[in-house]
Amino acid sequence: MDFNRLSMVYLNGNFIEKNKASISVMDRGFLFGDGVYEVIPVYQGKLFRLTAHLKRLQNSLDAIKIPNPYSNSEWLNILNQLLGHSQSPNQSLYLQITRGSDTQRRHNFQALTPTVYIESSPLTQKTKQVLEKGFSAIIQPDIRWSRCDIKATSLLANVLYSQNAKENQVEEIILHRNDIITEGATSNVFMIKNGSLFTHPTGTHILSGITRDLALESALACKLPVNESAFSIDGLLGADEVWISSSTREIMPITQIDNQTINHAKVGTYWECVYNHYQQLKND
Ligand code: PLP
C-alpha cells in the first residue's frame, strides 16, 4: 500500500505529506482555538451537500470575523484535488481555518492571513445490521458556551464529553440545559412521540447540522410530522424512538439512555424508514 499517497494534506496552498505539515507556534488556532472547521462526507468520490457545508462555513467565519480565504469554486477545486490523493471512494474531509499567526500572543486581533488546513480520511460506515442493534447514550449538563451555532475549533467541552463517552462505553453524550435537551456532544438529537418527530430548534444553543436537515427531510418523506421544538429529559426518556445525526454517523438509533431502554431496546420503524431514505439521498 502506498502510505504517502494516503497521507497527503492541504496546508496554505500546498498539497504535502501529513508528517511534513507544520504551523507556527504563533498560530492563533494553536494559542486560542481561534478558528472554525467543517466536516464534509464524500460518497463514491462525490462531495455530499457541499453547498450547505460551505454556507455553514461562511456563517462560522462571519461570526468570528475571519475573511473566507476562498470562493466556493476555489474550495471545490482544492477539495477535489485533495480527494484525488485518496484511495477509498468514501471519505471524511476535515477543513480548518484559523485566524492565522500574529507576532505576539494577545487576545485581540488584527487582520492576519488565515491558516487553512484540510485532511481527508476514509469514512467507514456501520452496516444496517449493526445499526439495528441500537446504541446507548448518557445525559449530562451542557457546559458549553452560548454560541454552539459556530463550528469553532475550541472544543474543550466536547473533548471531555468524548472521553466520558469512551469511559462509559456509550455512543454519545446527550446534553441538556436546564432540563431541556439541546443536542449531542457531536450530533443533533431527535425523539419521536406519538407519531411526531421533535428536535431542538436551531439557534445559538445547537449546531445547525447538515444531517439534521436531511433527517427532517427524510422524516417528512416517511410521513412523520416534524416539530422543531424543545423537549425535556423526561420527554426524551419517555420517547418511542430516539436518534442522533451527524455527517460521519448519518442517522443512528439510540435504544438505551442512562440505563433506561427506549422502545424496549428495539430500533423503531420510523428509523428504518429514514435510514432507507437517507441512503437514497446519498446516491442522488
Ligand atoms: N452538533 C454538534 C455539536 C456536532 O459536533 C455535530 C457534528 O460534528 C453536529 C451537531 C452534526 O452536524 P452535521 O450533521 O453537520 O455533521
Image (spheres, rainbow, N blue to C red):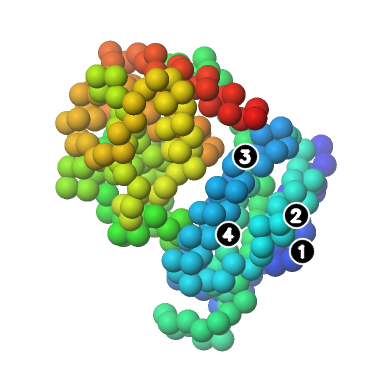
Viewer-side label of 4, 3: 3
Name the secondary structure under disc 1. Answer: strand
Place of residue 193 in the rendered image (x, y in percent of width and height, measured from the top left)? 25, 23
As measured in the structure, the alpha-carbon distance from the residue carrying label 1 to the one carrying label 3 is 24 Å
**Label 4 neighbourhood size at 10 Å, few (<14), some (14-19), many (20+)?**
many
Residue holding disc 1: 14
On screen, residue 4 above or below 250: below
Name the secondary structure under disc 2. Answer: helix
Amino acid of disc 2: Asn
Residue 71 falls in which quadrant of the image? bottom right
**Label 1 neighbourhood size at 10 Å, few (<14), some (14-19), many (20+)?**
few
Place of residue 227 in the rendered image (x, y in percent of width and height, measured from the top left)? 30, 34
Q: Which mark is residue 48?
A: 3
Amino acid of disc 3: Phe
Place of residue 51 in the rendered image (x, y in percent of width and height, measured from the top left)? 60, 48
Residue 48 seen in the current view: yes
**Label 3 neighbourhood size at 10 Å, few (<14), some (14-19), many (20+)?**
many
The image quadrant where one finds the C terminus is: top right
Amino acid of disc 1: Asn
Q: Are marks 4 and 3 in contact (CB under 8 Å)?
A: no
As measured in the structure, the alpha-carbon distance from the residue carrying label 4 to the one carrying label 2 is 16 Å
Q: Is mark 4 within 8 Å of ligand 1?
A: no
Residue holding disc 2: 77
Q: Which mark is residue 107?
A: none
Query: Which residue is depicted at the point 39% across and 55% down?
Result: 149
Residue holding disc 4: 96
Query: Which residue is depicted at the point 46% across and 31% down?
Result: 217
